[in-house]
Image (cartoon, rainbow, N blue to C red):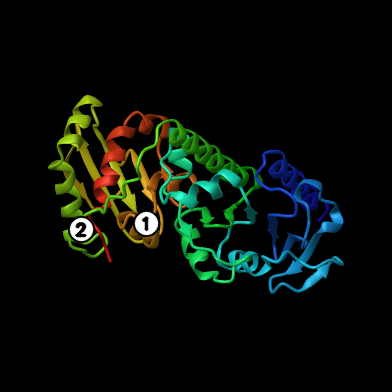
Amino acid sequence: YEKEKEEIIFWGKKLYERGLVCGSSGNISKKVNDKILITAHNSYLGFLEKEDILILDRDGKILEGNKKPTSEIALHLAIHKNFSEKIVIHAHSPYTVHYFQYFKILKPFTFEEKFYLGKIPVIPQNTPTVTDILPVIDALKKNNIVVLKNHGIVAIGNDFKSTFSLIELLEINAKLSLITQAISPVKEEIKEEKHLEKCKLFSKEHISSLVNIINNDETVQSLGKTYNLTTILCVKDEKEAFSFYYEKGKIIKVKNDEENAEFIFSTKREIWKQVFNGEIDPFVAFNQGKIKLKGDFNKLSKWFPVFERTFELWKKVAVD
C-alpha cells in the first residue's frame, strides 16, 4: 500500500498548504478493497510520514502500524460501511467553520459552487469528536460534503482530487461570503417553501402535478420561449421512465418510455424522492455521481435557466 500512503501524504500536505487544517487537526482515510488506510491520532497532516498511516480491517482492527488511529475512527468506519465512496476527509476549514457559527445557509457565488456544493447540510456538534454519527451519515446521503457546526467539515468521494476540491470550494465560498457581509451586511432570510399535498412518486397524480406546475408558471414559460426550449427530457429510475416533451418551454405531452429522449436523467427511486422533496439538488447530485446523464451536457447547459426554475418548482411536488 505504498502508493496509497504516498497519496494520503500528498493530499494531507495540500490541506495544510491551503489552510484547511492546522496543527494536528483533521484526518484522512481511504478504502482499498477490504482494507482501510487511515491517519493516526495526533498526526500533523501537513507533515505526514508513512508511519503515521495505519492499515485497518473493516471493523477497525489494526493490521499494520504501531500508533493509535485518529480519534474520529468511528466516523470513518461508519462512512466506509455505508457508502461506496473510497475517500473520507475531515478538515477544520476556518472560514467555513466561522461562517456557519453565524449563518445557516451559504449562497453560491458562481455556477461552479452551485453545481458542486448546492445546499450544505449542517449538523450540530458539541463534542470534540463526532459521537452521534447517524445524522452525519444521513446528511452525506444528500450531499458529499457536510458541515459539523463548531467543529469542521466531512467530505467523501471516489478520488482525492474531487473530495479535496469540495472542501476547498466551500472554504472559498465561505470566505467570500464573510467578506461580503463585512462590506455590506445582509440579514439572512430563510423562506419556508410551500409544498403541494404529497403523492406517490411517479404516480399518475405526480406526473400530472409536475406538468401543471411547469405549464402554469409564467417564469418557465417566458424563459422557455426566450431560450427556445424544445426537447425531450426523460427521468428514469430502476423500473420506469417518463419522457417530458417540451415545446418552447411548455410540456405538451408525457410518455412512459425513454425511446425518443434527447436527455435521460437516471438514478435510484430513493434519490428521486430526495430530489422532489427538496433534500438534494439535482445538479449537485449529477456532479457527485448520484444521478447519471445520457445526452450532450453542453447542449443542456444553454437551457440551464429554464431547468433551474423547473427543478425549483418540482421540489414543491413532494412525494412519499
Q: Is residue 259 visible?
A: no
Left or right position of 319 against 181: left
Question: Residue 209: x and y, percent?
Answer: 17, 53
Left or right position of 272 against 183: left
Q: Quadrant of the N terminus?
A: bottom right
Closer to the observer: label 1 or label 2?
A: 1
Question: Residue 182: x and y, percent?
Answer: 46, 35
Number of marks drawn? 2
Residue 62 in the image: above or below residue 311: below
Left or right position of 7 against 310: right
Q: Secondary structure at mark 1?
A: loop
The crowd level at tag 2 (other Cα within 10 Å; few <14, some 14-19, many 20+) is some
The answer to which of 131 and 218 lies nearer the viewer is: 131
Q: Which mark is residue 279?
A: 1
Question: Residue 157: x and y, percent?
Answer: 59, 51
Residue 95 in the image: above or below residue 74: above
The answer to which of 121 and 99 lies nearer the viewer is: 99
Query: Splitting the image into 4 quarters, where does residue 272 fall?
Result: bottom left
Kind of residue at disc 1: Glu
Q: CA distance from mark 1 to mark 2?
A: 17 Å
Residue 168 in the image: above or below residue 35: above
Q: Residue at x 55, y 69 (%)?
A: 133
Left or right position of 236 against 209: right
Kind of residue at disc 2: His
Q: Residue at x 49, y 38 (%)?
A: 178
The crowd level at tag 1 (other Cα within 10 Å; few <14, some 14-19, many 20+) is some
Q: Which mark is residue 206?
A: 2
Of pointers 1 and 2, the one earlier in the residue sequence: 2
The answer to which of 150 and 208 lies nearer the viewer is: 150
Query: Splitting the image into 4 quarters, where does residue 41 fall?
Result: bottom right
